[in-house]
Image (cartoon, rainbow, N blue to C red):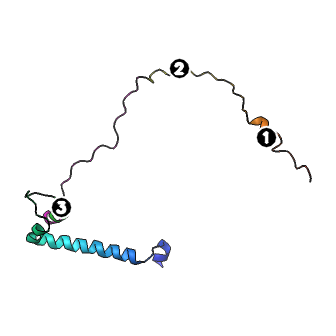
Amino acid sequence: MPCRALRIRSGWFGGTTVLLVAAAIVLMLGLSAAPNLHERLHPTAAPLHECAVTLIASGSCHHTAAAPLMIAPATAVQFSKIPALNPTWVAAPFLSASIFEHAPPAHS
């Protein structure tokens, strides 16, 4: 019943995705326990490289601070003085086209 309430469909795509993610995690754990296999998988010249296996083996992930999402707005020089607005009457061109739009029916 909870699957029907949440509208979760069980299909081959969901099962395959779960299987692939579980296999990737098991592979990463296995390679972190066996550094020789990790070296054979992708040999690197640098002793300190970052991949999923080394992050799992070290037990921590040191990341840099994220860039700020918003920059402080600068004052706009060209819009510092806004001229006063004067009201002006503009005739609506569409009012003459719908004179009988809300009239009563011709034949009742």
Cβ–Cβ below 8 Å for labels 3 and 2? no
Residue placed at 48% from the left, 72% from the top?
7
Q: Secondary structure at mark 1?
A: helix
**Type of amino acid at the residue the image marks with label 1:** Ser
User: Is 96 a magenta residue?
Assistant: no
Q: Which mark is residue 83?
A: 2
Categorize mark 2 by other alpha carbons within 10 Å: few (<14), some (14-19), many (20+). Answer: few
**Taking 13 as reference, is 45 left or right?**
left
Figure quadrant of residue 11: bottom left
Q: Which of the image's four quarters has the C terminus?
A: bottom right
Q: How far apart are the alpha carbons under marks 1 and 2?
A: 37 Å
* Residue at x 92%, y 52% (from the top left corner): 107
Q: Do callouts 3 and 1 mark residues in contact (Cβ within 8 Å)? A: no
Image coordinates for residue 92, horizontal then vertical, percent: 72, 32
> Would you say residue 59 sits in the magenta stretch?
yes
Q: Which mark, by number, is residue 15?
A: none
* Alpha-carbon span between mark 3 and mark 1: 70 Å
Quadrant for residue 88, please give it. top right
- In the image, residue 82 sits, relative to residue 7, either above or below, namely above
Disc 3: which residue = 51
**Residue sitting at 76 percent across and 36 percent down?**
95
Q: Which residues are magenta?
A: 56-77
Say which amino acid is labelled 3. Answer: Cys
* Residue at 37%, 33% in the rendered image: 73
